[in-house]
Image (cartoon, helix red, strand yellow):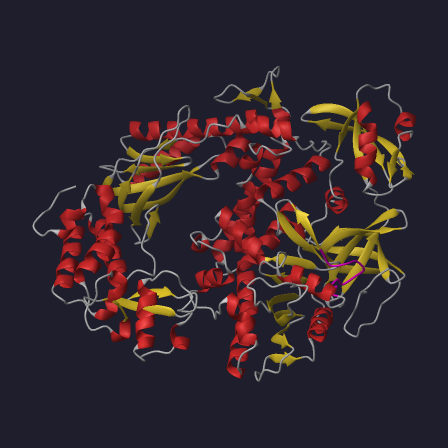
Amino acid sequence: MAKGKETSGDGAISGGPRSVAGQLIDADYLIVGNEALIRLTIKGSDGSAYEVYDPDFKPYFYLVPDNNAISEDKIMSAQALDQGSLIKPARVEWEDRSIFGKQARAARVFVQNPSDVPKLSAALSGLGECYENDIPFSKRYLIDKDILPLTMYEFDLEKQGSAYRLKGFKALPEVRPPELNVLWFDIETYNPLGVPRPEKDPVVMISYSYSSNGKHGKSVMAFKKIDLPFVEYYESEADMIKAFVKKIAELDIDVISGYNSANFDIRYLIERSKSIKVDFNISRFEGETRIERHGLVDRVKIGGRVHVDMYVVVKFISVVGAAEYILKLNSYTLKNVYEAITGTKKTNVEKKDIYKLWDGSREELEELATYNLSDSEALEKVYSTFAPIMIELTRTTGNSLSDVSVSTTGQLVEFLLMKYAHRYGELIPNKPDDREIRSRLINPIEGAYVKTPEPGIYSNLAIFDFRGLYPSIIISHNIDPSTVCTDCTDYYESPNGTKFSKSRPGIMPMILKLLIDQRAEVKKLYKKDKGNIYLGSRSQALKITSNSFYGYLGYARSRWYSRECASSVTAYGRQYILQTISDAEEQGFKVIYGDTDSIVMLLGGRTKEDALEFVKKLNEKLPKSMELELEDFYKRAVFVGKKSEKIGAITGAKKKYAMISESGFIKIRGFELVRRDWSRIARDTQRKVLDTILNEGSAEKAVEIVKNVIKDLRDGKVPIGMLAISTQLRKGIDSYDATSPELSAAKKAVKAGLKTKDEVEHAVISYVITRDGSSISDKAVLEEFAKNYDPEYYINHQVVPSVMRILKELNLTEDELRNAGVQRKL
């Protein structure tokens, strides 16, 4: 049955009953005969991978009959056709379940094959409502068995043929799972037409980096001889691909990671291998390597191994806000992400030139190989930065890593709710149909309250925010679709009039309390061990999951959608933030800004101790699960705002502010600070202006800084190096249709014999705008050859625009900056 088998260090297969300490890596199933067999991939603490089957677990769905007169015989008599064959239920078991708090007598209808579930549930739909007929079989197993992947268990196994049968398991909560064997890879393809064609264009190189059983290595595979120590030579493309498949098996890889590899690398290897008649199957056990749809993205299924596409992971991390340094990237290329997290440049070549390098000189082949290896090395760094969060999300939600790494926050919450619903005897609600989704979408839920700040400079501030406002509201008021009631006598009533029973615990509040309590404990441990990536990732995973419940409640495609619940959460949120603002102002504090779950208030003549005492008393009045916390005290802030109003909704200004804490930490939100491709004089001036406003509270001094810079520019006192503007040429210098300053500077240097084409093409060009020429492009000269500069260009196109991004919001005009002797107090 197995393609690959459980192996030990010498590759021998051990026999007989045995107990194995290990972690579940993945769960899938095979069809053997006419029955489905759940297959588990278990990585033992001994380093071996075990192929384990659980033949006793069968697929099923639920039927809640319209009336109690429907018998088991009636259900068993149902039938449907599957490719010409007649299929029937295997057996029926009656259970007491509930749906949204209402008790229901449900028939659990077992079938032979997972594909029988939708057909037989359709055949039985005339007898009542069918539930849980769209849950994938392997997910069904994880839900019912309540087993957490990547968590240590003691598995009781019995040898059967080349694999094992699962007899039972128990948790080993105090044992940390060993590291998985991981391989990071990247391919390069021949691409004379730009986009490679798998039926014609070969894979020319495969690079990989790995960590396996305590060993680390890296290499580039190619079918041309390249005189570099890390390059492996093969006689043909086919031999190279076969060697890559063999290498994955030899290294006993658990996790294979690429970057956009589901869409390109693995897809191309599969299609190209078919074209040249090579068996590209990197499965550890029986089954093909295939690509399948998961929601809105593709994922790769590999028998006995896990595929993690870090491109999908990085986009997820950015969406949930778990890494601020990649949030503002315009594109999530491997190069951009690597440079954002490391602060160092990555080796790069233009994709369209790969075929030229492959056909080129020895030096060009070496350049391509070095670039190919750098992709795998960069990927390893990106993986080590973000994959721990996905691993902890796997342990938090109970879904497999292969699913978690391609999931949205809503899908993570949904799976967790499925597990708890099954555990507590609730039927999993059905997905809404298209008509219901449209109905939900046309009736949006009112959002949070925002108090618009008055533009200006403020001193002596404090920021307080509610710790997990929406999750704590759900917990404190038992908000759950199953607790909504109309005739209950003991209830919470939300500001919009919805009642939630106090006597019936809801699954959502229950899960959220567990998550928040766990995170509180993890944060305590993390404070004592700040460098612990596992604790940091665990805290992030718990935060991401708990913060996603409210969004899932109001998500139109949610199984647990509830307008009453979602609108009650935001109504409570508005009530609490407005009451907090009112209480603060009654105590003599002035609240200048409020947004969703936080307030910014001026201390005025009050002390820090007064502010902390106010919060202490406020917390005494809040429900137990809610708490207003101090974020920090700030000595100065500059606020700007532009009102935007929506009819029928409470909205506020788009937040835009900068502030400095008493410890010197500068917090910036909404300001568009200039990027690295501006001149240093513009960047430095903008930062000095912001620092002066925040540290000294003086807009006048900030204006003086700008005027002094303008004067120095006009007097010719600014060094050339401060004026260089850097931009990368992404194509050859003869490939552009329009002329830009960097292109003009590069072409002039080549024409004058000062630079070669190879030196400027695809390079970062640093240029200065000089006085010599008519247009800006005409005036551009490479920094190292510039003899003068055009002061008016730098004043009007660099310095003034950079600082006006801050000062315009404080009612200053460009003329006040350019013209000496004109000042205006703010």
Magenta segment's dominant SS is loop
* Magenta residues, start to end: 280-290
Above/below status of 483 relative to 381: above
- Residue drawn at the location 31% of the way across and 44% of the way down: 657
- Residue drawn at the location 25% of the way across and 38% of the way down: 455
Residue 399 belongs to magenta span: no
Most distant residue in the bottom direction: 227
Q: Position of residue 135 (x, y in %)?
A: 73, 40
**Based on the displayed image, in which of its 4 quarters is residue 308 positioned?**
bottom right
Q: In the image shown, does 269 or 620 lie closer to the viewer?
A: 269
- Residue drawn at the location 64% of the way across and 64% of the way down: 179
Question: Which quadrant would the C terminus be assigned to in this image?
Answer: top left
Q: Position of residue 771 (x, y in %)?
A: 18, 66
Question: Which quadrant would the N terminus be assigned to in this image?
Answer: bottom right
Above/below status of 178 relative to 326: below
Asked whether residue 385 appears in the rendered view, the answer is yes
Q: Quick check: 331 left or right of 252?
A: left
Asked whether residue 256 appears in the rendered view, the answer is no
Above/below status of 306 relative to 642: below
Q: Quick check: 90 left or right of 395?
A: right
